[in-house]
Image (spheres, helix red, strand yellow):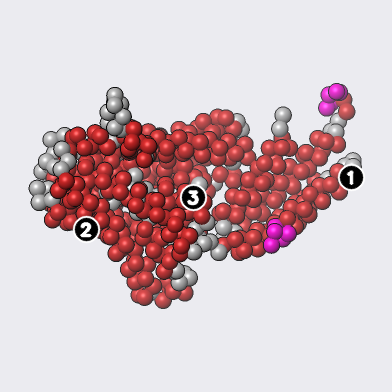
Amino acid sequence: MAVGLAVSFVPGMPSFRLEPELVLVIVLPPLLYSSALDSSYVNIRRNIRPIGLLAIGLVLATTLGVGLVAHLAIPALSLPASLVLGAIVAPPDAVAAVAIGRKLGLPRRIMTLLTGESLVNDATALTAYKVAVAAATGAAMSWGSGILTFLLASVGGTLIGYLIGVVVHWIRLRLHDSVLESGLGMLVPFGAYLIGEAAYTSGVLAVVAAGLYLGHNAPRAGYATRLQETAVWRAVDMLLESWVFALIGLQLRVVLTDSGATWPLFGSALLVLLAAIVVRILWVYPGTYVPRLLSAKIREREEPPSPRGVFIVAWTGMRGVVSLAAASALPLDMAGRDVILLCTFVVTVGTLMVQGLSLPGLIRLLGVRSTDEHTDTLAEAQVKYHAAKASVERLDQATSEGTPEHVVTRLKLLAEHRGNAAWERLGRSDDEIGETPAARWQRLRLTMLLAEREVFLAARDAHEIDDEVFRRVQRELDLEEAALTRE
């Protein structure tokens, strides 16, 4: 983004005007879908209350809070137009925060909250945005009808995404071609978004629901598809995110030219930036502690939140390209449009530069680290022991009298090694010659891997191991299966 800011003033550089449809249809769906694929449905469901407070409650609170501050700081901006600005800058973009958190080892619950918030808050903000724009342009839409619209869009979009996920998963299980399966998966985010929007529901939630369903059921698909998709979506994410942040920086000259920015107006925009940061902090602390004070069940079910961890969640309010896209999509004749675009740009760049650059240092300074490693290793070791035992039993059932003893011994040794690994961290045709020892080795080992996969999947579904543990072990099994079945 910093490079984009600098390049925007290079002589002869053309004006890069952000096209809202490009972001909302081409960029946002694949980023949301990839994040949903990699998210834990189990962990999100387990933390649905705090995620809802962030993704719905905080977005609405930011819309009102920032809107009021903007109206007071910029009297020329009407209250409806100020609320439009509040809705535009309400949804944080967790891309930077999640990337930093993973690298520095933030606790799993914080990562789940940030990821879950980013998957849903765009839908809330875009609905509030539509209601506010209708009020600002004189169209007839009350907040009551806006709430009804949001509920219908949320339920409808989620249902559409779920049905798309079910259908796509059913088809992929019957293709038996990893290239076709991956190709179909690449179409899902765009199809889900367009179908959801065409049905007057939330295309964002349709994409998220489809991604969560397919990601949760990915273990039932082929190993080659999982390995391919992991590599492809990581590359797509890197390209889209880099391009998006560069595009944010390149907007600087365009925004300054269109808004006719003055120093007093820029100072008011900084007040809006401050309001966006402060509202999140003021919301996160009561949202964390008040429910615990009011509910004994929450106190029994959840561990006491760390004040340092709560502050990290409160500080990760960086805005992204969705806010700029929404501002750019405002009607050209709307009063205060240029001021809204300037304030949106200041909030987006300001939160990325202030909060984004300071976040790694704050995490290190506060010592917020994950304590899940020992628990994960213990759970992984226990399930690996049972998985190795099940694979040996399946081997005994699959072997016949003609199986060489050294093949059986080697297979059993491999199973024992896998079971102990986690603890240690704490020329003729086949018709002519029949099944060769190598072919029999391959068949029997694949049979054992299937048994191990079934045990791990059952443990994941029974909440005995976390999704992160399951995916780590699943990748080990996928890589071994890929080695066994390579041409």
**Amino acid on which disc 2 is placed:** Gly
Image coordinates for residue 479, horizontal then vertical, percent: 67, 41
Query: Within 10 Å of the Cα at label 2, are there few (<14), some (14-19), or many (20+) other Cα atoms?
Result: many
* Whether residue 325 is visible: yes
Dots 1, 3 in contact, CB < 8 A: no
- Between 472 and 261, the one lying in front of the other is 261
Region of the chain picked out in magenta, as a range = 422-431
Residue marked by disc 1 = 406
Query: Residue sitting at 47 percent across and 38 percent down?
Result: 238
Task: Residue 39: give its label.
Answer: 3
Residue marked by disc 2 = 65
Q: Secondary structure at mark 3?
A: loop
Query: Residue sitting at 64 percent across and 60 percent down?
Result: 377
CA separation in Å, label 3 and label 2: 30 Å
Looking at the magenta stretch, what is its main secondary structure?
helix
Point out the tag, 1 or 3, that comes first from the N-terminus: 3
**Amino acid on which disc 3 is placed:** Ser
